[in-house]
Amino acid sequence: MAIKSTSPLSGLLRKSPFKPIQEHMRKVFSCVCLLPPLFDALYRNKQEQVADFADQIDRVETEADKLKSEFRLHMPKTLFLPVDRRDLLTLLRDQDALADNTEKISQILTSRIMVVPEEIKELLDELLEATMEISSEAKLMIEELDELVQVGFGGREYDKVIKMIAGVRRGEHNIDKILHKIKRKLFSIEDTLNPVSVMFWYQIIEHLGDISNQAENMSDRLLLFLSK
């Protein structure tokens, strides 16, 4: 006698392979949304609050990891999908990378006391804002997956998602320009800062940039879905 799975994700998969992907993305986005308050606490030199937000990020990232593992565990290899199974798993991996990079940033900010150089604050704010925007746009794209399937990856829904994909790509291009500016500014003041802190600031900036890169990867994956 077959034993039925008690996991709620297995039920979601029977209804739609995209429901768990969307659920995972919501959790990932919740993780990324903790970046602004984390940096706000850092700006105000509230180390206890920095640690508190870092703990929250760690918990949410762990929850996202559990959803990812459940999805992989309960996704039958024989499942008939409107898209390639490997492409779906790659999309899941790209989503997960957003939360991973968020956690890496929080770990740096709690591994040592970091002080934000005044010279990069404005650009850092700009980078954070752009990161939140592109993460939000990526989440909205994923929320449209079910609608796309219902209309056979065509019609007005297709045009809507194509515009979203174009928006994510523009956002990533804009973030690349901000990254270039903030790296140049940081390079210009390196001699006035603690060398170890400089190294960690470059890492933080790279991780923020990686979030936008993964969002663009997600848009490329959706474009692949639409082209098949």
Image (cartoon, grey):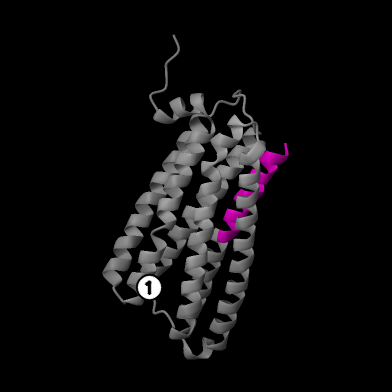
Q: Amino acid at mark 1?
A: Arg
Residue 101: x percent and y percent?
Answer: 49, 59
Judge from the rendering whether residue 173 lies leftward or rightward of residue 39; answer left or right: right
Magenta stretch? 212-228
Q: Residue furthest bottom?
A: 192
Q: Which structural element holds mark 1?
A: loop
Residue 161: x percent and y percent?
Answer: 61, 46
Q: Residue furthest front?
A: 156
For image coordinates 45% across by 12% down, the residue present is: 2
Residue 105: x percent and y percent?
Answer: 45, 64
Front one among 2 and 168: 168
**Can residue 71 be seen?**
yes
Q: Label the magenta part by its dominant secondary structure.
A: helix
- Name the quarter where the C terminus is drawn: top right
Q: Residue furthest left?
A: 48
Front one among 183 and 199: 183
In the figure, residue 110 lies in which quadrant? bottom left
Judge from the rendering whether residue 155 lies leftward or rightward of residue 29; answer left or right: right
Q: Is residue 125 magenta?
A: no
